[in-house]
Image (cartoon, grey):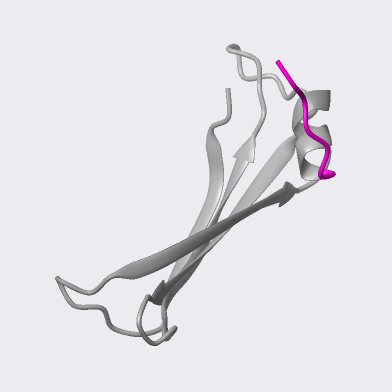
Amino acid sequence: MAPIVDAGLKFRGRAGYDDLLNMVTVCDREGRARLKFETVITLADSGQLVAEGFTIHALTTPEGKPVRIPDWINDLLNGETHEQ
């Protein structure tokens, strides 16, 4: 499980109803049992910043006890790939 334990959002600009947006999300470790996702949203045509935010997720058992980040996620964060 990965419940959200912290989140934040800052609006930096405006976007209209029909505006096309780009959204980029980056994931990184936040300690041994948490992942942080940071997101930036920009206008597709101008690149103007619209919003930026983050969520931090604690990795837990179904009972809520913290667990370490699994090796396969660490490998992905290190740029390694796995074939199935």
Which of 49/84 is in front? 84
Which of 77/45 is in front? 45
Residue at position x 37%, y 76% from top? 44
Which of 64/47 is in front? 47
Outermost residue, left side: 17
Quadrant in which the C terminus is drawn = top right
Q: Position of residue 42 (x, y in %)?
A: 42, 75
Q: Is residue 39 left or right of residue 70?
A: left
Q: Position of residue 5 (x, y in %)?
A: 57, 42
Count of numbered badges drawn on the protein: 0
Residue at position x 60%, y 40% from top? 57
Asked if residue 3 lies in the magenta stretch, the reply is no
Q: Which residues are magenta?
A: 78-84
Q: Is residue 33 above or below residue 83?
A: below
Outermost residue, top side: 63
Q: Is residue 37 above or below residue 16?
A: above
Outermost residue, front side: 83
Asked if residue 79 lies in the magenta stretch, the reply is yes
Residue at position x 35%, y 82% from top? 45
Residue at position x 60%, y 12% from top? 63
Q: Is residue 18 above or below residue 75?
A: below
Magenta span dominant secondary structure: loop
Residue 44 visible from this viewpoint? yes
Quadrant for residue 72, please give it: top right
Residue 70 visible from this viewpoint? no
Quadrant for residue 49, please give it: bottom left
Q: Position of residue 35 (x, y in %)?
A: 68, 43
Quadrant in which the N terminus is drawn = top right
Q: Position of residue 11 (x, y in %)?
A: 38, 77
